[in-house]
Image: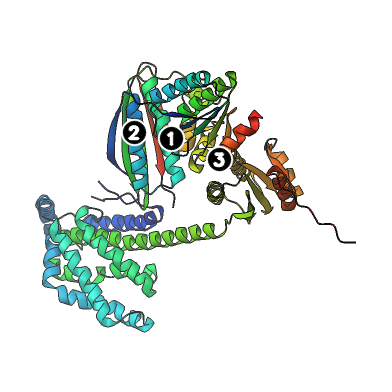
Amino acid sequence: MMHIGDVTETLAAEVGLRSDEEIVRLRQIVRDHAIAQGFSLVDQTKFVTAASELARNTLQYGGGGDARLSKLTNGVRVGLRLLFVDQGPGIADIERALRDGFTSGGGLGLGLGGAKRLCDEFAIQSEPGKGTTVSITKWKLR
Amino acid sequence: MYHCPALLPWRQVGDAIGFLRWHFFTQLRFHSPLVCPLWSNLRWQVCSGDFMDTPKGAALIDILSRHRDTLLTDWLNQHLSIALRRGLTTEAEMREQFRSFLNVFTDALQRGDILDASRPEWEPVRAFLADMSSHRARQGFTPVETATFVFSLKQPLYARLRAELGDNPAVLAEVSWNVNLLLDALGLYTTEVFQRSRESIIARQQEELLELSTPVVQLWEGVLALPLIGTLDSARTQVVMESLLQKIVETGAGIAIIDITGVPTVDTLVAQHLLKTVAAARLMGADCIISGIRPQIAQTIVHLGVDLTNVTTKSTLADAFIVALQRTGSSISTPSAAA
Amino acid sequence: MERIPILRMGNCLIVAIQVDMHDRLAIALQDDLTGRIVKDKAKGVLIDISALDVVDSFIGRMISNTAAMATVLDAETVVVGMQPSVAITLVELGLTLNGVSTALNVEKGMALLQKRRR
């Protein structure tokens, strides 16, 4: 139900992430939707790059999973939200994973911190043995 | 039941007032024996179940259909004298607007018996109000005047309702209350639309300002300069960064001089943005020189702990230009004066 | 699986990445390049990424690794044509591509390679 002032979310695409090619396919789908939502070129690139990082995580560390892309509206603002879900081993120390990255000489290579910096909103839920869910959101400025 | 759609903050003020009114209203209905004589009370207790089942808007629709013209005239007359005095519109235009609203309002009521302005059945009414709101804004009406347009329908409507439902106070109270809520929501909606259009105008103007104030100039072959003037905020710095990098690609310039002589203060955020610009340019294969660093800014930069060890800095644009020329393999020579 | 073509110009190898590479393709390119450096006794490698509108950490690391391997094999690497939005994103991501020379276009890249070789 639509409320004035609330965020409305509509599912736009669902992509399975079980192979390299599907990561590429996700990048293209996200790029198309970012263009459609009117994101600037830089914002498109940032969001697609973040998606690519997280998709790779889902594939490599999560044993494969799914990505769900939704279109957001909040009054006159529009945005995109990507949800990555996997049933993999989960992350034991999320704090550390967010701090580490490829900048610290390889580290866990999770790229979570990087993806977080590239987006407006970032949320992660993970427990060892219970899989991981990561959500990134980007709004169209102005 | 009191229904409250999710509201923008300032709407909650209007709604708070509405709540107080509801509270007073309900107290009156339940506790005033003068208004509800005993047999009416009993009748209400017996019939309230029935009333809840019948369409709430039925009585309303009935009144609106049968008394449309008198309603229109009563409603219009409240506004005519004021509006015409301000000379913003004509009587014919106003009559047309008011009539159209009543039509679209009645239509929505007939479509469903839900008196909730945020439902899809009320979309035509919202669209009409949004249209009218921008039209009136252009004519010069204030948003309060436009909202009052909606609120002022209450009085003639209540008068009609009292006349028709006077012998059934419980129903009268229920219908009046629903009308009240409905028109409140619609009136506030016009103001919301007005605000949003102002916000988009401001945003557009800001964007135009940004474009005007970030010129990138080519000083020499392969040397660009970006003279920054005024305070730098996050948004502006990002736009500046992007246009400089784009210009670097377009001109194939190997060196960009970012001159901050005209920037009064540099805070951590701005310093970080500048450093990111330099890093991005370097990734692309171009170099940056930052010039125009005044003593105060130099102090701020050191205090903030900003690391400029990998960045060439010069105090004046002229010095930076000479360095740039050297790096691109050129130099300035002054022909010696003939003896 | 298709492979990205590698051209040779003098003692330099030139690669223009025109497609959105999946990870296996990127690894294959890395292998092919190192193989060709040895086979052609190349002294310079020029990687043109002007057609890439996304460079994530994987591709970034592939480029860094290729440059490092090339150095071990006594060849210089230059990456040319990075798009501004890609550069901005990489900076935000924290990927520095240390050890990789960059130039704005193929012409400047080749000039850089020639200069270094002298």
Residue under numbered circle 3: C107
- Residue B169 shows in this picture: no
**Residue visible at 46% across and 24% down in the picture:** A110
Q: Is residue A102 left or right of residue B192?
A: right
Q: Residues within 10 Å of mark 1 (few under 14, many from 20)?
A: many
Q: Which mark is residue A49?
A: 1
Q: Amino acid at mark 3?
A: Glu
Q: Which mark is residue C65?
A: none
The chain letter for the residue carrying disc 2 is: A
Q: CA distance from mark 1 to mark 3?
A: 28 Å
Residue C90 position, x and y percent, is 51, 35
Q: Which mark is residue A26?
A: 2
Mark 1, mark 3: which one is toward the viewer? 3
Q: Secondary structure at mark 2?
A: helix
- Between residue B215 and residue C9, name the one nearer to us: C9
- Circles 1 and 3 in contact, beta carbons < 8 Å: no
Q: Amino acid at mark 1?
A: Thr
Residue at the extreme front of the image, as rendered? C10
Vertically, is C79 above or below C84? above
Residue B287 position, x and y percent, is 63, 41
Q: Residues within 10 Å of mark 2 (few under 14, many from 20)?
A: many
The chain letter for the residue carrying disc 1 is: A
Mark 3, mark 2: which one is toward the viewer? 3
Q: Residues within 10 Å of mark 3 (few under 14, many from 20)?
A: few
